[in-house]
Image (spheres, rainbow, N blue to C red):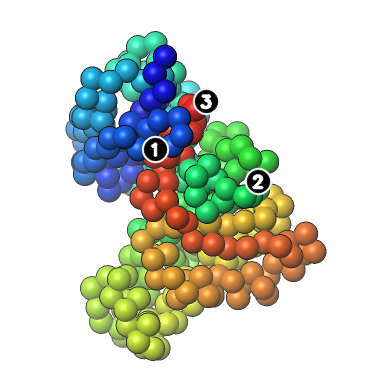
Amino acid sequence: MTDLVLALDVGGTKIAGALVDRDGRVRRSARRPTPVDDAERTWQEVRAVITEALAGEVVAGVGIACAGPVHTGDGTVSPINIERWQDFPLRDRVADELPGVRVELAGDGVCMALGEHWLGAARESRFVVGLVVSTGVGGGLVLDGKPYGGRSGNAGHLGHVVVEPDGLPCTCGGRGCVETVAGGPNLVRWARAQGWQARDAAELAEQARAGEEIPLAAFERAGRAVGLAIAATAAVCDLDLAVIGGGVAQAGELLFGPVRRTLATHAGLSYLAGLTVVPATLGGDAGLVGAARLVT
């Protein structure tokens, strides 16, 4: 019996696949950019990643992490950042490629949290929220040591917690979500609206480290939004740890400092006294590792 599983991580920027053993080691991986202009083209790239990652190997199961919303009941996905995939039958399509093999689907935020809980920064915790703060803001929950997707598979999507009720419209159809404040492009948009000139969030972080007022204010604002979402989720779910990864989180204390200050102000209930926030440690592999864990 093989100890290998296939892990897939499908997002709006990239499609990644990996052969992962039962100890969580990535044996072989493949990656392709995500074409978002045509549903079938996107699927063909997923197929290509499957073929490249497998390279003829037999696997015991397939775990899929996908940008959401997902619907774990019927295995369909409708990612906000892949507009052509609406109710796309991703789980069944993958199952058709590997007949007789178990296939499990979860949101990418859930898989990130699960990966960090299995092998990363959350190994010592049982009640965890994982966040990816990047182009968008995603999240997922591990409760009592198990991934928790809720009714449809989308529980823990902190990027769409409302932190500014009168804020900007969000791609989800709401207003004032965390993503409208803390997502990388929105960080840059806000700073430019204040008169700052630069290319991207990496340059924003560089100038914030140099003490520039507007970039510092942008990260303060983003960290506060993320902290408010964590505080609300922790109060509801009785969490002990928040793990934050993603490109914007690479700014380190520029983001983590205001997150922690916000929690100190807003997470006042006695049972949240031990709530801590730490950086993710698995990097870009967290979603793949978590997807593999779905079937190991």
| Count of residue discs | 3
* Front of the two marks 3 and 1: 1
Instruction: Say above or below: 218 vs 22.
Output: below
Q: State the residue at coordinates (51%, 70%).
A: 256
* Pointer 2 residue: 126
Query: In terms of depth relative to the viewer, which is nearer, 42 or 30?
Result: 30
Q: Residues within 10 Å of mark 1 (few under 14, many from 20)?
A: some
| Residue 199 seen from this side | yes
What amino acid type is highlighted by mark number 2?
Arg
Alpha carbons under labels 2 and 1: distance apart: 22 Å
- Helix, strand or loop for disc 1: loop
Q: Tell me, yes or no, whether the two marked residues, 2 and 1, touch with CB atoms within 8 Å.
A: no
Q: Position of residue 54 (x, y in %)?
A: 26, 25
What amino acid type is highlighted by mark number 1?
Arg
- Helix, strand or loop for disc 3: loop
Q: Position of residue 9 (x, y in %)?
A: 36, 39
Alpha carbons under labels 3 and 1: distance apart: 29 Å
* Pointer 1 residue: 25
Residue 82, located in which quarter of the rendered image? top left
* Front of the two marks 2 and 1: 1
- Helix, strand or loop for disc 2: loop
Instruction: Say above or below: 213 vs 255.
Output: below
* Pointer 3 residue: 73
Q: Position of residue 164 (x, y in %)?
A: 54, 67
Q: State the residue at coordinates (68%, 70%).
A: 266
